Amino acid sequence: MIKKLLYICMILPAMLLANNNLEITLEHNTTSKSPLEITLKVTNTSEEPIQIKPSHFAYPDGGVLRDLFSVQEDGEKIKYLGILANVSEQENIILAPGDSYKGYVNLAKIYNTSKGTHNYEIVYNYADKSNTLEVEATITQKYKRHKIRRLRTCNNNELAILTGDHQGAVAATSNVVNSMPSLGSSHALYRKWFGYATAGRYHNVYTNYQRLHAAFNHINYSCASVTRGECKSTYTNAFVYQNEMLTPPPHNIHICPAYWNNSSSRKMNTLIHELSHLVLGTVDGTTSDGNNPYKHANGAQNLASIRPDLAIRNAYSYGYYAPELSTSGGGTTSSVGNVWMTGAYGNNVNISKILSVSKGSKVTVSVSGNTEANYDFIYIYNHKGRLLRKLSGHINTKFTASGKSIKATLTSDGSITDTGVIIKIKRKKSWWEF
């Protein structure tokens, strides 16, 4: 075995670290039973604590949550076949001065390696410059790489929550499709997440949301009971398999325990983010040179400002834009279907949505969720503009309205906010239809 050990001091992105006091060690574990096992260690060489995100490295119990390396086998780049996980921004650990964080990964299990003896070039893509490890390894078996498996069928309580989240994501993508033609490419919220728009890029984003909206009709969900395996990080919300990207439906999204702790808006974000991997082939905040610091909200906005051509391929951009367009009012009160999930709202908002069904003379309206009691309000109007309900605080109500549509309005004052509400309508059947 040929082993080349590189020690690299690199500058991490500003959202993680403002200095270059991390030493990175990339090493081939020649004593492991796995022929292509790599150890990745990061050490704080400074005199101050440093914050890092474990999902940007390998985990101590083995494995990675996304494509962190570029791997060549005998000079040919081979495909990553592992998982693409959605990890909360709160996932952080503190490295004390002199401390290290070390993990390992068997690359033969998550990259499309071939049986036999081969020369491998492994590039760790996180740094501002490429960091390379060259090894020779003998692959003795064809691994069953992340075969598509179901964690388990989601239980009734999980399905009930997922149904609301799913409907909210459907409404959010529908709102984008309905709103983009009238908002135009200079719309501030579009530029926030996708950057300066050419006619071609704007059209691409629009058609991509059309594809996402249609794909929500063909999703299978599975759920994990414990934090292990692909859900190893306590901050992993959900994941998909790389080798299911750009394949025919159904689209399989796997839900981890951390998912249930998020706000409605964040869960909607997660579902759109993961579906964009499968349907659009999006990546997680990665630039063309392999660096991937453009994750989460701040990273996605930075990428939009400097590389809008890459922002339209960023899963984070699609995940953030649609829910925010819904909660901000999106510049339009056009119909967005029969569900409005406001998500966590801001101060001093006054936003409205029209919800409608295709036929019938009456609708059943249900409203559930929370606003700041006696200060933030939900107003429900019928199709003629007559006020039907003024709601505030903890809300869980259902009632009937005449017509095929309603208008719902959310207003808030200048201080405390809450998690928001879900408003749904469905056609009320006439007596002769029962």
Image (tube, rainbow, N blue to C red):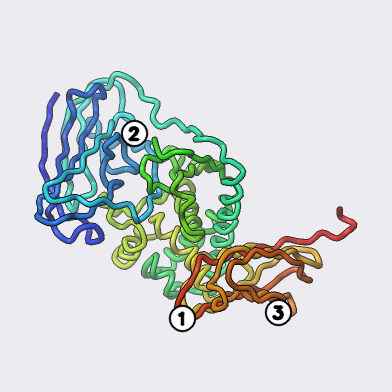
Task: Please report contact status of discs 2 and 3: CB closer than 8 Å, yes or no.
Answer: no
- Disc number for residue 414: 1
Mark 1 element type: loop
Mark 2 element type: helix
Q: Amino acid at mark 1?
A: Gly
> Where on the picture, by quarter, is residue 210?
bottom right
Query: Circle 2 sits on which residue?
Result: 110
Residue at the spot x=12%, y=51% of the render?
Answer: 97
Can the viewer see residue 333? no
Indicate which label's residue lies in the foreground, 1 or 2: 1
57 relative position to 398: left or right: left
Mark 1 surroundings within 10 Å by alpha-carbon count, few (fewer than 14), some (14 through 19), many (20 or more): few
User: Vertical placement of 37 versus 95: above or below?
Assistant: above
Q: Position of residue 258 (x, y in %)?
A: 43, 48
Q: Amino acid at mark 2?
A: Ile
Can the viewer see residue 224? yes
Mark 3 element type: strand
- Among the two numbered marks 2 and 3 on one chain, the one whose residue lies closer to the N terminus: 2
Query: Circle 3 sits on which residue?
Result: 387
Q: Position of residue 385 (x, y in %)?
A: 71, 80
109 relative position to 320: left or right: left
User: Vertical placement of 288 versus 198: above or below?
Assistant: above
Mark 2 surroundings within 10 Å by alpha-carbon count, few (fewer than 14), some (14 through 19), many (20 or more): many
Q: Amino acid at mark 3?
A: Leu
48 relative position to 32: left or right: left
Q: CA–CA distance between discs 2 and 3?
A: 57 Å
- Among the two numbered marks 1 and 2 on one chain, the one whose residue lies closer to the N terminus: 2
Q: Position of residue 114 (x, y in %)?
A: 31, 25
